Image: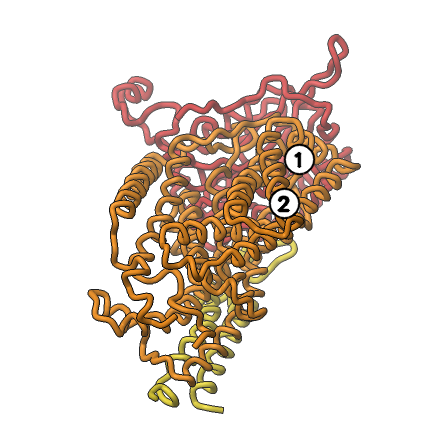
Amino acid sequence: MSTRALLAASIALAGFILGVVAYFVLAAPWGFPPDSVAHSNPRVPFAPAIFVAGVMMVFIAAIVYELWPGNGDHT
Amino acid sequence: MPKYAMTIDLARCMGCRACMVACKVENNTPEEQFWMYVFRLEEGEFPDTRLTFLPRPCQHCDNAPCVKVCPVGARYKREDGIVLTDFQRCIGCRYCEVACPYGVNYFHWKSPKKGQYLNWNKDAEVKERGNGETPPWHNPDHDRRYGEERRLTAGAVHYKGVMGKCTFCVHRVEKGLEPACVANCPVRVFEFGDLEDPESTVSRKLRESNRFRLLEDVGTEPRVFYLNGQPPTSEHRQLDAVKGGKKG
Amino acid sequence: MSIQARTLRDTGVGRWGPLSVAAGAALLAIVAVGIAAYSQQLIHGEVVTGLRDWGTQGGSPWGLYIAFVVYFIGVSFAGISIAALVRLLRIEALQPITRMAELLTIVSLVLGAFSVLADLGQPLRGITNLFRYARPQSPFFGTFSLVMAGYLFASLVYFYLAGRRDAYLLAQEPSRLQWFYRWWAAGYRDTPAQRARHERTSFLLAIAILPLLVTAHSTLGLVFGLMGGRPGWFSALQAPGFVVLAGVSGLGHIAVMAALVRWLLPSTREQIRPATFRLLGIFLMVLGMIYLYFTLIEVLTAGYAAHEREQELVALLLWGTYAPYFWAGTVGLGAAVTIGLVQGLRGSWNIGAVVAMGILVNIAAIAKRLIIVTPSLTHGSLLPYGHGVYIPTWVEVAIIVGLMSLGALAILAFSKLFPIVPLESEHAS
């Protein structure tokens, strides 16, 4: 696997994991019924921003993959 | 931790709407907003008609749809069961209002100060009513923060573009007082108290009377219990609907 | 076709003819009216709109703004679905419209975000507090995070990467925007290795964005479908219905846009061929049929033996207050499907007819969005409040029309910066 592919794959994976973790562990917990104040606050401040960043990272990987310099850029 | 609940004895209610007025005075709700509302309902065809009354505060549901849908956690349920709005966090999307089947939410379409019945910007007019002084335009207790989280939750006086609704008069409850509607009812329709305490009036009344909760089949688990009456049906029509006009 | 054959001149880039200037100025004027309307709303609050609380105020707390949030986000369906069709199924005839479809997606998503802001009582808090406190339990979470962040960002990435080749070609010629093309190309030289790499990423991106597309439009449907206390909304059909109607309005939009580009830029006529419109027409027809089927099932379920409030709402749609909207929507879709069927049977697809289908389905989609949002709020009360009314004010209308003009202006401006039709087929050479 090339550095480029490895890098892109790891960024995408990291972004995905970040998104999943932020959604299930860092953001406000689900509640059925939502009978406590705990359901209204994220467990870590700015957890939704972290989730969004994770989703974005997955797609940033594509840019990294294409723009990473080297190998075949010049003919 | 107490578990607050309210009982409404429909056999006692005579539809005087003193609770609506008490709520307005206590919470300084702007024009056209009724955190407490009393349905005056008619049923049957003339001459065989029957009148019933149904007070409608916020139901402070245990499975509150408004709390579930709030995108930012501004609408939340305290451990003691009171459902409140954090006026400093609310973004004004009105999703809670749309999700609530009881129609208890009132949005501040304009600045709450502008919406008052008396225009505080016209000083002379206010002074005349205030015996030569300009009284504060709202209850200062609303500016204090309540509960463990110290959130701004009391009264209807804070910002335009946020949602408001009945708070069970959280600023009075925190002082050990009853909500304004309960305290001001001339015939003691309402009781407010702790469900955890088997000796409280609400617990005793719930044991002794027939009871129902509004729209039980929607699964919201209200903390407001109606005693000695029947839930409204589609046969009921409003006698004198209090409608807000379209005026600005 | 060689690169030289279609230079900057033929693509319309950098050329502001009298028509473009007039159109731009008119759009700008409408946007200005929209901004004036919005400033009224900011100063006085949403009292200047026709929105009011449901219940004792007898109004509807959601109206035109939310209907157009749904509509704009629906239109965004076009871009990625066309890109995915091209990438995954190798449909070459759609290749020339991929860029304008992607552009439409990005623009309409931004317009959707603006409509949300127009609806919020505290728009500034909307921007900060959503990033700070947003709760996954709220159906809005998906709209905010997946649609606005994920879907929009993914489309931007796709758009950027797919445009690098053209940017490289444009950077070869001297022009005032050469620096911009160089920046966009970012080292792209169209070598076989780079081309292969781009093939791989765009394929993977298309696969990754497709589930996002379904999720995004579904979450928007769930905003309504999950509300157990609202007759007319609470339905498992909402989410899939939103996905299908999004497809209908998005593809309809792109058909109109493609015809417009083809008409205004004669150099693109060789690329955007009748075959392109035939495909769009077929997709429109099929999706339109699916949506008509959904409508039938919805009306049947709510009208047959449901809760009496559901039945009342169906009556309201079929012959009550909201009947004009319902029938505009249903007949519009039906007419579009019929036009499609006739052309399909004749075996020849006329560009004008497909454009007519596109316009019809969009009118239908707007009507349909309006009757998704308001009837349940004005007439869906489970308590005896009585009925409400909702009539939008000029402020709401001006803001929505202003947003549409803003979108059109953005597309017009972009077409002057960059060829709106890819310079040549990426697979030719």
Residue drawn where x is 46% and y is 59% of the image: C272
The colour chain A appears in is: yellow
User: Residue C178, position in %: x, y?
Assistant: 23, 69
**Residue B84 shows in this picture:** no
Q: Nearer the viewer, residue B234 or C405?
A: C405
Which residue ends up furthest to the top in the rendered image? B47
Q: Which residue is mark 1?
A: B7
* Image quadrant where one finds the C terminus of chain C: bottom left
Q: In the visual, does C138 lie left or right of C127? A: right
| Residue C337 numbered tag | 2
Q: Position of residue B30 (x, y in %)?
A: 43, 30
| Residue C351, above or below A57 | above
Q: Quick check: C28 left or right of A41?
A: left
Q: Which of the two marks, 1 or 2, is nearer to us in this view?
A: 2
The kind of secondary structure element at disc 1 is: strand
Kindly identify the amino acid type of the residue bearing the numbered disc 2: Val
Tell me the red chain: B
Dot 1 amino acid type: Thr
| Figure quadrant of the N terminus of chain C | bottom left
Residue C203, horizontal then vertical, whole percent: 52, 74
Chain C's colour?
A: orange
Residue at image position (38%, 83%) is: C191
**Along the viewing direction, whichever of B94 and C416 lies nearer the viewer:** C416
Residue drawn at point x = 62 percent, y = 20 percent: B15
- Between B201 and C152, the residue placed more toward the observer is C152
Packing grade of label 1 (10 A; few <14, some 14-19, many >=20) is: many
Give me the chain letter of mark 2: C
Q: Which mark is residue B103?
A: none
Query: Count the marks: how many?
Result: 2
What x and y, as percent, mark residue C112? 45, 50
- Examine the rendering and report whether any part of residue B99 can be seen: yes
User: In the displayed structure, would residue C79 be above or below residue B22?
Assistant: below
